[in-house]
Image (cartoon, rainbow, N blue to C red):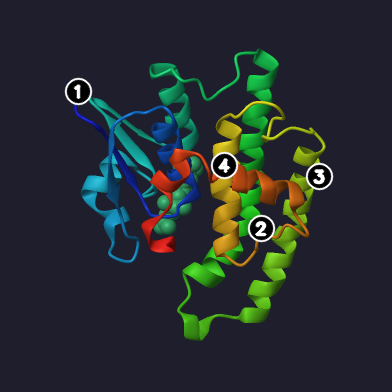
Amino acid sequence: MADPMRLYTMPGSPYGRRVELALTEKGLAYEMFPLSRSDGDLQTEEHLKRSPHGRVPALIDGDVTLYESQVILDYLEDRYPEPPLMPSDAAARAQARVEEFEALLYYLPVFAPIAKLKFMTPPEERDQAAINAAVETLAGEQDKLETRVAGRGGDYILGAGFSRADLSWLTTVEIAERGGLALDAARFPWLAAWRARLSERPSYEATYPANWK
Ligand SMILES: N[C@@H](CCC(=O)N[C@@H](CS)C(=O)NCC(=O)O)C(=O)O
């Protein structure tokens, strides 16, 4: 039997957790290797060989070593197509990627200042007014997501079917919540109901970061 895959990530990383969710949804065996920025794990010679920019996630599958979460997800879909996490129709597949890019290229950069102000700053040095302002800016981005996906009238990000777009947005809105943007049903009713639905999938509990419990 092949060795389990090896996933190097930081607990809670939205990039790493979307890969963990995909591995779990596909029923693939993997071992987790949690890394710590503050312990210097991202800059070791060993990790830089796996991920030359000193980031997570990185995945090793036999003799294949990959970094960049989007590339890893594409590899998993190509190499282990069942069960599929992408729609079969070309237009719907493109739409799934648009949603992934919305999360990666448009939403997460708006979240980045919050990560810096909150997760990378000691509590006594945190500027709460700046955090509040950044959270409100992010809430504006999340309003756009709420309107777009609720407008599709389905249970999932693309509308009717569960897909990789759900994994990417789930990990993204949940890291935002850790940063202070509550997934409040009054402001984000569709997203709050969707998160409750996804949290009933076995993959949710299996990949929920231990340090968030
Ligand atoms: N484009 C990369 C982004 C990965 C990324 O930025 N990961 C963060 C963790 S959430 C990281 O490793 N940051 C390096 C650091 O914190 O020093 C991907 O999708 O894999």
**Which residue type does callout 3 highlight?**
Thr
Do the residues under discs 4 and 1 have CB atoms within 8 angstroms? Answer: no
Q: CA distance from mark 4 to mark 3?
A: 19 Å
Q: Earlier in the sequence, mark 4 or mark 1?
A: 1
Quadrant where the image shows the N terminus:
top left
Q: Earlier in the sequence, mark 1 or mark 3?
A: 1
| Numbered disc 1: secondary structure | loop
**Can you identify the residue that label 4 sits on?**
198
| Numbered disc 4: secondary structure | helix
Describe residue 145's horizontal placement relative to residue 208 as left or right: right
**Which residue type does callout 1 highlight?**
Ala
Q: Residue furthest top?
A: 89
Does label 3 point to a residue whose CB lies under 8 Å from ligand 1?
A: no
**Can you identify the residue that label 2 sits on?**
183
Dot label at residue 110: none
Do the residues under discs 1 and 3 have CB atoms within 8 angstroms? Answer: no
Describe residue 192's horizontal placement relative to residue 121 as left or right: right
**Which residue type does callout 2 highlight?**
Leu
Whether residue 38 can be seen here: yes
Describe residue 141's horizontal placement relative to residue 72 as left or right: right
**Can you identify the residue that label 1 sits on?**
2
Dot label at residue 147: 3
Q: Residue at x 67, y 40 (%)?
A: 102
Q: CA distance from mark 3 to mark 2?
A: 14 Å
Do the residues under discs 3 and 2 have CB atoms within 8 angstroms? Answer: no
x, y (%) of residue 128?
Answer: 62, 80
Do the residues under discs 1 and 2 have CB atoms within 8 angstroms? Answer: no
